């Protein structure tokens, strides 16, 4: 994992949103849970697209917060499906902050999320083969 400004995000842009004052902790930084929630949303979008149906999050591999997100930053979340099993998918997710005013871009965290495809009854179902 690298964190220099010259690095490029890995995967496709799935979510882009602005960090607002209501999302801050007592230090004025955006809550890590807020960032993680946006990452989960982005992974869900990628998982639904790949599995052609509902998915649920079942695990998150180690997540390290590299840089804080500040009010006014635009959080950009990128996804890449790494591995597809019979019913599950591992999706690499990166969160990048486009800094307020300067528009500089920095990676703030990344992780691999595991999603399971489910049917209308909430039971695991097979992920279809790629077209």
Image (cartoon, helix red, strand yellow):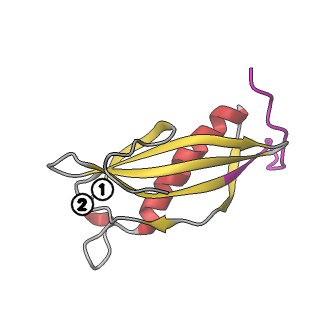
Q: Which of marks 2 and 1 precedes in the sequence?
A: 1
Residue 125 falls within the magenta-colored stretch: yes
Q: Where is residue 117 in the image (x, y as percent from the top left)?
A: 76, 44
Q: Are marks 1 and 2 in contact (CB under 8 Å)?
A: yes
**In the image, is residue 35 above or below residue 24?**
above
In the foreground, 19 or 91: 91
Number of callouts in the render?
2
Q: Position of residue 39 (x, y in %)?
A: 50, 53
> The C terminus appears in which quarter of the rendering?
top right
Q: Position of residue 46 (x, y in %)?
A: 59, 39
Main SS, magenta region, reads: loop
Q: Position of residue 28 (x, y in %)?
A: 25, 72
Q: How crowded is mark 2: few (under 14 residues within 10 Å), some or many (20 or more)?
A: some
The residue tagged 2 is 71
Q: Left of 53 or right of it: where is 24? A: left
Residue range in magenta is: 114-131
Secondary element at image label 2? loop
C-alpha gap between disc 1 and disc 2? 5 Å
Secondary element at image label 1? loop
The residue tagged 1 is 19
């Amino acid at each position: 994992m690298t964190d220099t400004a010259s690095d490029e995000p890995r995967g496709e842009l799935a979510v882009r949103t602005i960090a607002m004052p209501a999302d801050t902790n007592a230090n004025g930084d955006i809550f890590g849970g807020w960032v993680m929630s946006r990452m989960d949303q982005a992974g869900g979008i990628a998982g639904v697209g790949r599995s052609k149906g509902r998915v649920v999050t079942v695990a998150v591999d180690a997540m390290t917060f590299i840089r804080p997100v500040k009010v006014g930053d635009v959080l950009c979340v990128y996804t890449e499906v790494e591995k597809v099993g019979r019913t599950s998918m591992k999706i690499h997710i990166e969160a990048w902050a486009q800094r307020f005013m300067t528009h500089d871009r920095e990676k703030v965290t990344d992780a691999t999320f595991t999603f399971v495809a489910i049917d209308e009854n909430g039971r695991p179902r097979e992920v279809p083969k790629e077209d």
